[in-house]
Amino acid sequence: MADPTTSSSLITPAELRDLAVKMAANSAQLVARRRAELLSGNTASTATALGQQLKTTECDPVTVVDKENEKALRDFLTSTRPHDSILGEEGGGEVMTGDENAVTWILDPIDGTVNFLYNIPAYSVSIAAAMNGKVVAGAVANIVGNEIFSAHRGGGASAISVEDALADPQNARTAPRLSCNEPANLGVTLLGTGFSYTASKRALQGALFSKVISHVRDIRRLGSAALDLCFVAAGRLDAYYEHGLHPWDRAAGGIIAQEAGAVTAIPDPAEIGHKGTLNYAVAPSVAKEFLAMMEEAGGLQPMPLP
């Protein structure tokens, strides 16, 4: 087997998955530890203690832990695979194409930062690997849930504990495979979705929400797209949709849902979220009904930012 931390050697999707699992498990521990350290004995507000800053709008925060974790991930990749490209939510970057062996890592150091600030237990770390612009492996750490979801192209998807991932990342390859639910019809489907930080786009998403909610069992809004996609893979949601996800939101969760059998529409990582493309992952048994519902509601059209 090629050493996956030697960038001059060719690397397989399975080995990229191993690295993603290792990084996700280490990140899960870092994020949990740093949150506890920053809040311990601190009498300031949670936002102040966690070093909150604002990005695109006043509803779109970033914390010192987001930045520390992305730096740790970048430092690891730079030292172990220096010829790979990196695209991260906080540090930017680009996707390498034109070479079938060109590897790009797509990083979200905390997906669900608002939940992280409010201590709502639904935030994650998302790490995906693309070869020649196509995602071939990914891992998502459900930090509070102590789970590492992962998949690689053709290798299925699984979920293992952080401890098992740290003991040996290859445990993810041999763990029982995840599989989507098989709801009988759309009316008994539990649907997940999400909303933009931009008010005008959120209003459009709310209008679509009002058209689809009567067609399904119920709707959940977790606040972490990566977890939404993994929850479809694990059968905790039957379907999920959202317009305008960024590459770091969708890349790892997308391949995990695909490898668990979901019908998906997940753009390649080079496509930016501002185009407003519809992303979805749906249990196959209701995919036809879901798409018909979305077409009738006007949900198949992009929702680009103004």
Image (tube, helix red, strand yellow):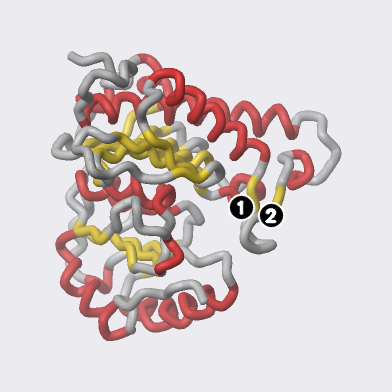
Write down the residue under mark 1: 114
Q: Secondary structure at mark 2?
A: strand
Residue 86 rendering spot, x and y as whole percentages: 42, 37
Query: In the picture, residue 256 is in which quadrant?
Result: top left
Q: Nearer the viewer, residue 226 or 109?
A: 109
Which kind of residue does numbered mark 2 sit on? Leu
C-alpha span from label 2 to label 1: 11 Å
Residue at 42% from the left image edge and 75% from the top image edge: 303
Mark 2 or mark 1: whose residue is earlier in sequence: 2
Residue at 40% from the left image edge and 24% from the top image edge: 82
The disc label shown at residue 54, or none: 2
State left or right for residue 142 relative to residue 262.
right
Residue 39 rendering spot, x and y as whole percentages: 74, 34
Q: Nearer the viewer, residue 221 or 34?
A: 34
Q: Is residue 112 above or below residue 126?
A: below
Residue 85 appears in the figure: yes
Front: mark 2 or 1: 2
Q: Residues within 10 Å of mark 2 (few under 14, many from 20)?
A: few
Where the N terminus falls, by quadrant?
top left
Q: Secondary structure at mark 1?
A: helix
State left or right for residue 295 relative to residue 227.
left
Q: Is residue 140 above or below residue 185?
A: above
Residue at 39% from the left image edge and 77% from the top image edge: 213
Which kind of residue does numbered mark 1 sit on? Val
